[in-house]
């Protein structure tokens, strides 16, 4: 059963109650004071167990995933940071910068600081 949070309108005191999803989400205390419901943002985490060095694993993991394009970019950025933390540089990023420069007659990408 889900946990719901309520806040006393005068004192600001909070209380967590376990209520069924189909129940009325109202809390009235013994003094007949109706508490305000606090709406919490759900805490979800994208599965980050993807191998940062396996591009096929990333494609398989994200192909059926629901979410926005921004979520995909964030996950890609996390894997890039893991590669950088482990090796001191990101070989996928370096390869991209090299190919970018090659296609543009030596012009560097604006994020390529090497």
Image (cartoon, helix red, strand yellow):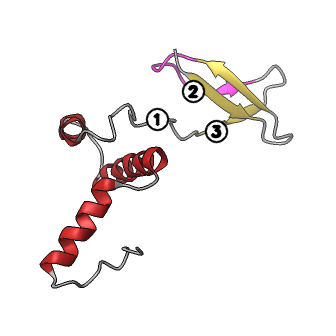
Q: Nearer the viewer, residue 16 or 110?
A: 110
Q: Which mark is residue 38?
A: 3
Residue visible at 30% across and 62% down in the picture:
94
Say which element carries label 2: loop
Tell me if mark 1 has few (under 14), some (14-19) or many (20+) residues whose alpha carbon lies within 10 angstroms of its own.
Answer: few
Q: Position of residue 84 (x, y in %)?
A: 44, 51
Residue 59 on the magenta span:
no
Mark sitting earlier along the chain (3/1): 3
Q: Main secondary structure of the magenta part?
A: loop
Q: Nearer the viewer, residue 98 or 2?
A: 98
Displayed quadrant of residue 7: top right
Q: Secondary structure at mark 1?
A: loop
Question: In the image, which residues are magenta?
Answer: 19-28
Q: How many marks?
A: 3
Q: Residue furthest left?
A: 103
Question: Relative to residue 21, is residue 10 depicted above or below?
Answer: below
Report the residue marked by disc 1.
44
* Residue 25: image tag: 2
Q: Position of residue 106 (x, y in %)?
A: 21, 83
- Residue depth check, mark 2 versus mark 3: number of the one nearer the observer: 3
């Amino acid at each position: 059963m889900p946990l719901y949070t309520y806040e006393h309108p005068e004192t600001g005191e909070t209380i967590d109650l376990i209520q069924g999803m189909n129940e009325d989400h109202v809390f009235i205390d013994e003094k007949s004071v109706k508490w305000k419901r606090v709406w919490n943002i759900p805490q979800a985490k994208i599965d980050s167990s993807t191998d940062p060095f396996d591009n096929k694993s990333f494609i398989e993991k994200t192909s059926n995933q629901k979410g926005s394009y921004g979520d995909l970019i964030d996950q890609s950025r996390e894997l890039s940071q893991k590669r950088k933390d482990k090796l001191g540089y990101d070989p996928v990023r370096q390869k991209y910068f090299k190919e970018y420069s090659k296609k543009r007659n030596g012009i560097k990408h604006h994020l390529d600081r090497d």
